[in-house]
Amino acid sequence: MTGEEIRQVVLEILERIAPDEDLTDLKDAVSFREQMELDSMDFLDIVMELRKAYRIQIPEEDYQNLNSMESTVSYLTPKLKDVPVAS
Amino acid sequence: MALDDRIVITGIGLTSPNGNNLAEFRRNLLEGKSGVVDYETRYMGPVLAGVCNFDELRYQKRKDRRRGTRAGSIAVYCSNEAVADSGLIWEQVPKDRVGVYLGITEHGNVETENEIYEISQFEYDTKVWSHHHNPRTVANNPAGEVTLNMGVTGPHLTIGAACAAGNAGFIQAVQMLRIGDCDLAIAGGVSESIHTFGIFASFQSQGALATHADPTKACRPFDTKRNGIVVAEGGGICTLERLDEALARGARIYGEIVGYAMNSDASDFVLPNATRQAECIKLALDRAGMTANDVDIVSSHATATEQGDIEEASALRAIFGESTAVINNTKSFIGHAMGAAGALELLGNIPSFDDGIAHATINLENHDSRCALPNLVANEPRNLGEVNCILNNSFGMLGINSVVIVKKYV
């Protein structure tokens, strides 16, 4: 997956986790929490969705990398570069 | 009895397979409209069920709904509806003086089945087991979701009481109001049982799951062709207050809970016991200072199982055989709403205080002589002229019996 494809995957996960939010103008450099109502259980949902879709194990000490879209894509890019987008 | 010991119903919220508020529910009970439909389950395939279609998003966001449970959603809907109906100005209600007491038959089976199915799609890798599983399946979940949704900071608990749970929720509330544990109780019963195959499969294995070519005719208490239970979901929740406070704020009073009782059969895991049921009814009447002759409508528990109906009819004959009380049944319309059954069955009868009519038990084509009952309201509602007292039976597995008596407030 390319960085843009990973961004789309994460965006779709966010849309499922926070279905009441309008993510049209999500700013990639700004933390998710500043733009959306997300708590710790929601972040675990992001981790879980990635685990289910791409079998990625994200250790707890790496959760800080899921702070914003930019940092999330940056963190996931090496892990997913050889993985196709899940259908 | 002192006014602050007298407990009254001041608001009603409900969802039933044939109505999402009291007026709609009552209208369909009087018009003989069933809420039982064909229903698809995972693993078992087609069954019959009572399915609710209330608006889940009236009081919850989609995210809340995603995170919570169906039982929680039913409880949130009914609680908000009850408070809206009560005339209370919610913003002004001290939330630390509100208690939430909800009867449940069981809780957590739906979510557990869903998670097991989910990990089965991942070769049973438990690493994909949801972190939401525990907060969804703790036994207080339905009541806890109400407190989260409504900002209630007083006590909340669920009362696990099998199919006697709806009445048990009301009884808990009466007791808590009397000891001053809260000033407003949000109480009743809820069930999400239809969302897991297990309850259907277990009743089928027990030979107690109803079948019929016409779903609306499947639940037939006291009929010779009854062949078991129709499982339903639903919720019936009231606001309950001490009489003095209800009067002080000029509340509409639906009725007063004047008597209640709970006891145990101590005889069998599943088979009911007419003697203990009769004792429970008698105890409730004694506590209310009433006799059978004071009761106008008996809302029966009968689920349309072979033995259950026979036992309850025997208990009812023992207490009401010589009285003029009429007997009806709500499950014949909506199926067995489990934790909500007792609550819905009481609430659907409450409007009889205003209209003087007893709704029927439907689908009674050939009355089983072993279930002989005096004054059974068969198939068509009966105009009694005036109704002043309703007695509501609700019994459950492991031999748990509950009776609530509600009197018209005048």
Image (tube, rainbow, N blue to C red):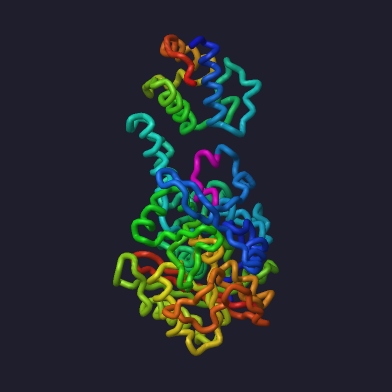
Q: Position of residue B62 (x, y in %)?
A: 58, 38
Q: Which residues are magenta?
A: B64-75
Q: Residue B81: tell me if it is visible.
A: yes
Residue found farthest to the front: B213
Q: Quadrant of residue B57?
A: top right
Is B135 within the magenta? no
What's the magenta bit mostly, secondary-structure-wise? helix
Task: Answer left or right for B42 relative to B217.
Answer: left
Q: Position of residue B146 (x, y in %)?
A: 54, 51
Vertically, is B164 above or below A70?
A: below
Is B65 within the magenta? yes
Vertically, is B366 above or below A15?
A: below
Q: Residue at x 46, y 78 (%)?
A: B284
Q: Quadrant of residue B408?
A: bottom right
Q: Residue at x 50, y 55 (%)?
A: B49
Task: Answer left or right for A38 relative to B200.
Answer: right
Residue found farthest to the left: B267
Q: Nearer the viewer, residue B380 or B3?
A: B380
Residue found farthest to the bottom: B322
The number of numbered discs placed on residues in the rendered structure image is 0
Q: Position of residue A64 (x, y in %)?
A: 45, 20
